[in-house]
Every structure is written in structure tokens, then in C-alpha cells.
């Protein structure tokens, strides 16, 4: 039955292949809310599109296969996906999050789930011993991103999973930055993988979507129940767009990664740049761990300009690279984490975790590298305070 072995092929042929009824090579957009039943309860497997829709089901099967899990679930956004996972917990439970998770994940815990007495603590998940010492009987899950947002902090998935398994709690990994092309958290012991599919999976900055993949039947049943009960599902058209985006993930990622390597090198050798955060650099903390668990360092980098460069002048001087939230699109996007993606995190916490006012995050697109470097070089030059 195995007609392919490689993930590049799975991106194109995985999950549900085409449409048996018509021979269409793509899964149709089943734009319907409900389904005719022959007799009450007798139907073709679908009753109502919140519960199940064939286009969404095709995407969910594809994501389960790509992430080496047992089931996948598609949500209206990455945060809806994270919200569904947090809904597994009850009042009195606690979740440990790593110190630089996505700002929205922090906000969801701090401003919404806290009201239901589901609490959190922020820990340095790169320090495994210390992490284990923070696991009390209230802690029901460890939630990590690796590389994390925006300093690309690397957490050892396997080492954390040994601890979570020992204490019989869940390990949740937000795999948005790496995608299943570069990293498979479930292979290293994660129980749940989350994606903001808005980013690389969609890949074209034209949709908002979230994915949850689980590693067991038990979790599949629970997340499936929450997905239907709470109802933050992904629509058929967006499910189609996502399947379409995933088909080109490997070729896009290869170019994203190649361009990022070139830009990281350019920035490191530029006299205006104080520091570059990039997991592919051998002297980057955690680069060895990243090599063990991922194909490469991905396509996100952050950097700081020296004090004699005006960061706003730099942003204003960019002509090609777009100042915007989000990442993972074909176009290069740049952002200022302290005031944009991580503004929800209190200033003091931001400073402590290294998200300084001077930090710049770049999501390298798939444009020609010469144009990107030209744009960065001229903007840096113009931003010098003379
Ligand atoms: C964007 C993002 C999210 C949130 O996803 P949305 O699709 O914007 O709701 C979560 N985690 C990471 C790492 C992200 O980059």
C-alpha cells in the first residue's frame, strides 16, 4: 500500500487523494452546512459541518499523516487551536509555558483561562533539571515552542518528554516555526502538536487557520469533542486553501531556509549589527540540540542593530520587505516584537527574556536573495545616526 516514503511526496499525495466520484485530482470544496439523511441517523458519515466536513476532513487526515500523529483537527485560527488544547484542563490545573512563547498564547492563559482558575507558570524550558523541579501535582502539561518566538530559543523536545512522561502529564509543542518538513515533535515524545497554519503551512499570507495533531485515540476523542462542542472550526474554503498551500511546502521551505542562511551571514558581517539570533550558527546556544531534532535551523531570524542606528528609520527605509505581523509567507515580513507580536507580554517580563526594544524579527520570504540583501543593506545604511 505504501506508494511513497518521502515527506515531499506526502505533501502532495497525503491524506485524502482527489475525489472518487468525479475523478477530480483535488478534494472539492464542500461548501455545505448540512447533509441529507436517508432515515434518522442513516447517512454517508456526515451530519452537520461543525461536526465534520469532507474538505476539512481531508486536511485533518493530511496533517495527522504529516505530523506522524493519530488524528488531526483544523480550527479557525492558531489561537482557536491552542484554546481547544487548553480546554482539556479544568479549574485548579496548571500549565507550564516556556519563557518566550507566542504573545497570544501567553495572553490567552493570562487573560482568559486564568478566569477559569487554569493557571500557568513561565519557565526556562532549556534548563531541564530546573523544569522538572517546577512540576507540582497541579501541573498537567508543559507547552513549548522550539525554536521559540522571537529569540529562537531551542528546547530539547526529547529531554522534556522524558520528564512529562515520568510525571504522566502532557507535552504540547507549537511547531509553527518548523513545520512537519523540518521537525516532527511526536517522534521525540510530544503528545500534541499545534500549528498556526496561518504561517508556513498556508504560506501565502491569505488565510487564518490552526491545526492540532494528537498522538493517541484518547486525546483524539477529547479534542474532537471540544472541536465540535466549542465550534471554532476551519471553513471548507480555507481548508481547501490550506491543502493547496501544503502541496508546495517543501519547495517553499527550501528557498526560505536558503535565503535565511544568506541573510544571517550578511547581517553577522555587517558592522551595524550587534547580534544575530539564528539556530544554524554553530555558536548559537542549542544549535546541537536543534540539529538532533530538526532538519535545519528554519527560516526565522532575529537581530539587533547597534545603538547608533535608528530602528524606526530602518523600518521606514525598507522598500521591499514589509513591516507587518505574521510570518511564513512567500513575501519577506519584518516586525518589532516588543511593540507588535509580543506587546501583550508585560515590559518587565519582555526585558527579562531578552525581547529588547532594539530587537527585530525577520521572516525571510522566497524572493531573489539579491533583492532582499540590497533592501536590508540600504535601509541599514540610511538608519545610521550621524
Ligand atoms: C501566529 C502564531 C500563533 C497564533 O496563530 P493565529 O493563527 O494567529 O491565531 C501561535 N503560535 C505561533 C508560534 C505563531 O507564530
Image (cartoon, grey):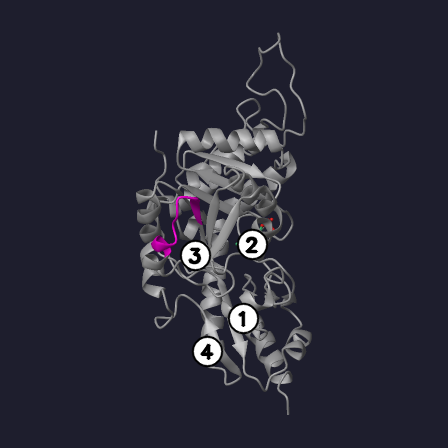
* Mark 1 lies on residue: 351
- Badge nearest the viewer, 1 or 4: 1
Secondary element at image label 4: helix
| Image position, residue 278 (x, y; %) | 44, 68
Q: Dots 2 and 3: beta carbons under 8 Å? A: no
Q: Dots 3 and 4: beta carbons under 8 Å? A: no
Question: Is residue 69 rendered to the left or right of residue 24?
Answer: left
**Residue visible at 50% across and 82% down in the picture:** 270
Locate the N terminus by quadrant: top left
Q: Is mark 1 within 8 Å of ligand 1?
A: no
**Residue visible at 51% across and 37% down in the picture:** 90
- Badge nearest the viewer, 4 or 2: 2
Is residue 140 part of the magenta span, yes or no?
yes
Give the Cα distance between marks 1 and 4.
Answer: 23 Å
- Badge nearest the viewer, 3 or 4: 3
Secondary element at image label 2: helix
| Badge number at residue 146 | 3
Q: Earlier in the sequence, mark 4 or mark 2?
A: 2
* Mark 4 lies on residue: 268
Give the Cα distance between marks 3 and 1.
Answer: 20 Å
Is residue 309 part of the magenta span, yes or no?
no
Q: Is residue 18 visible?
A: no
Q: Earlier in the sequence, mark 3 or mark 1?
A: 3
| Image position, residue 330 (x, y; %) | 58, 57
Q: Earlier in the sequence, mark 3 or mark 4?
A: 3
* Mark 2 lies on residue: 106
Secondary element at image label 3: loop
Q: Which residues are magenta?
A: 131-142
| Image position, residue 108 (x, y; %) | 59, 49
Amino acid at each position: 500500500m505504501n506508494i511513497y516514503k518521502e515527506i515531499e511526496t506526502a505533501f502532495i499525495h497525503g491524506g485524502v487523494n482527489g475525489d472518487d466520484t468525479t475523478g477530480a485530482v483535488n478534494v472539492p470544496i464542500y461548501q455545505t452546512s448540512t447533509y441529507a439523511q436517508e432515515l434518522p441517523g442513516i447517512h454517508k458519515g456526515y451530519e452537520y459541518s461543525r461536526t465534520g466536513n469532507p474538505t476539512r476532513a481531508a486536511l485533518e487526515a493530511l496533517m495527522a499523516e504529516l505530523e506522524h500523529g493519530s488524528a488531526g483537527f483544523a480550527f479557525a485560527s492558531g489561537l482557536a487551536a491552542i484554546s481547544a488544547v487548553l480546554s482539556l484542563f479544568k479549574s485548579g490545573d496548571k500549565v507550564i509555558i516556556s519563557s518566550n512563547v507566542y504573545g497570544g498564547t501567553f495572553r490567552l492563559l493570562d487573560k482568559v483561562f486564568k478566569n477559569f482558575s487554569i493557571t500557568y507558570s513561565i519557565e526556562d524550558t532549556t534548563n531541564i533539571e530546573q523544569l522538572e523541579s517546577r512540576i507540582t501535582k497541579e501541573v498537567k502539561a508543559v507547552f513549548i515552542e522550539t525554536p521559540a518566538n522571537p529569540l529562537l530559543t531551542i528546547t530539547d523536545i526529547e529531554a522534556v518528554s522524558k520528564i512529562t512522561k515520568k510525571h504522566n502529564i502532557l507535552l504540547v509543542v507549537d511547531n509553527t516555526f518548523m513545520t512537519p518538513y523540518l521537525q516532527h515533535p511526536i517522534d521525540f515524545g510530544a503528545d500534541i502538536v499545534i500549528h498556526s497554519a496561518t504561517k508556513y503551512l498556508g504560506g501565502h499570507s491569505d488565510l487564518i487557520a490552526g491545526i492540532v495533531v494528537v498522538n493517541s485515540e484518547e486525546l483524539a476523542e477529547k479534542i474532537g469533542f471540544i472541536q465540535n462542542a466549542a465550534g471554532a472550526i476551519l471553513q471548507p474554503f480555507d481548508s481547501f486553501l490550506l491543502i493547496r498551500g501544503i502541496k508546495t511546502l517543501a519547495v517553499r521551505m527550501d528557498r526560505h531556509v536558503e535565503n535565511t542562511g544568506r541573510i544571517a551571514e550578511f547581517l553577522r558581517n555587517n558592522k551595524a549589527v550587534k547580534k544575530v539570533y539564528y539556530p544554524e550558527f554553530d555558536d548559537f546556544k542549542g544549535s546541537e540540540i536543534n540539529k538532533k531534532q530538526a532538519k535545519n535551523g528554519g527560516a526565522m531570524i532575529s537581530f539587533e542593530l547597534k545603538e547608533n542606528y535608528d530602528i524606526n528609520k530602518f523600518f521606514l527605509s525598507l522598500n521591499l520587505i514589509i513591516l507587518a505581523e505574521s510570518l511564513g509567507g512567500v513575501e519577506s515580513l519584518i516586525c518589532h516584537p516588543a511593540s507588535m507580536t509580543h506587546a501583550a507580554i508585560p515590559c518587565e517580563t519582555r526585558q527579562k527574556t531578552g525581547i529588547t526594544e532594539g530587537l527585530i524579527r525577520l521572516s525571510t520570504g522566497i524572493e531573489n536573495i539579491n533583492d532582499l540583501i540590497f533592501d536590508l543593506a540600504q535601509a541599514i545604511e540610511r538608519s545610521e545616526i550621524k
